[in-house]
Amino acid sequence: MGHRLSKIYTRTGDDGTTGLGDGRRVPKDDERVEACGTIDELNSVLGVVLAAASLPQGIALCLTSVQHELFDLGGELCIPGHRLIGSEHVARLERMLERLNDSLPPLEEFILPSGGPATAACHVARAVSRRAERRVWRLARREQVNPEAAKYLNRLSDLLFVIARVLVRHERGAEVPWRRTRDEPSAGPA
């Protein structure tokens, strides 16, 4: 592979448009660009999770594989009609999800997104994954989109929730159960 990005700026986007993989120029706030951008944001947040010190090796390998697949998914969305994510990718996430979830105690109530640095970043990644899924569904209402793309993001958000539960234990933290505000006594004036 040659030098694909020898020049970082091109000035072609200064008019508020950007190029898709098929050569078309579209507005930077186009639904397809929004979906691609949210996938990129998700990949970046996973990089923050991976930057945490001493992640369990299996989690690090899983998230690195997901980063590669998210790059593929972004490429797929950038080229209308192109497909790189298939049912086998969704099935792999499901297997990982089941394996990790089997080692956890059952949830009896909602938990707050908290914990150590890796856990908290994983919760952010989960929320961004849900937004990416919404962006893909919005695009799918207007244009043809690979249905496996939305399924992949749906499973990924579930997997990231389970990984956050694993990581809170790895970081020697505790899950914080949600309590309805009205169930808490008022702290009163400080």
Image: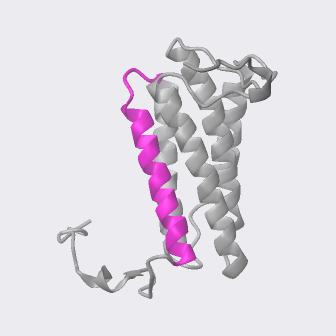
Residue at 53% x, 41% y: name it.
124
Residue at 74% x, 22% y: name it.
102
Does residue 88 appear anywhere in the picture? no
Q: Within the image, what quadrant is residue 183 found in? A: top right
Per the picture, the main secondary structure of the magenta-coloured stretch is: helix
Q: Residue furthest left?
A: 6
Q: Which residues are magenta?
A: 30-56
Q: In screen coordinates, is 137 left or right of 70? A: right
Q: Position of residue 53 (x, y in %)?
A: 37, 23
Taking the magenta stretch, the answer to whether it contains residue 174 is no
Which quadrant, please, contains the C terminus?
top right
Q: Nearer the viewer, residue 30 or 188?
A: 188
Total numbered labels: 0
Does residue 113 appear anywhere in the picture? yes
Residue at 45% x, 44% y: name it.
45
Q: Position of residue 66 (x, y in %)?
A: 52, 46
Q: Position of residue 84 (x, y in %)?
A: 56, 64
Q: Position of residue 24 (x, y in %)?
A: 44, 88
Q: Within the image, what quadrant is residue 106 found in? A: top right
Above or below, 136 against 10 in this view is above
Q: Nearer the viewer, residue 38 or 66?
A: 38
**Color theme of the render:** one colour
Q: Nearer the viewer, residue 52 or 73?
A: 52
Q: In screen coordinates, is 144 left or right of 35? A: right
Q: Nearer the viewer, residue 175 or 9?
A: 175
Taking the magenta stretch, the answer to whether it contains residue 42 is yes
Residue at 17% x, 69% y: name it.
6
Above or below, 32 against 117 in this view is below
Which quadrant, please, contains the N terminus?
bottom left
Q: Residue furthest front?
A: 189
Q: In screen coordinates, is 43 left or right of 3? A: right
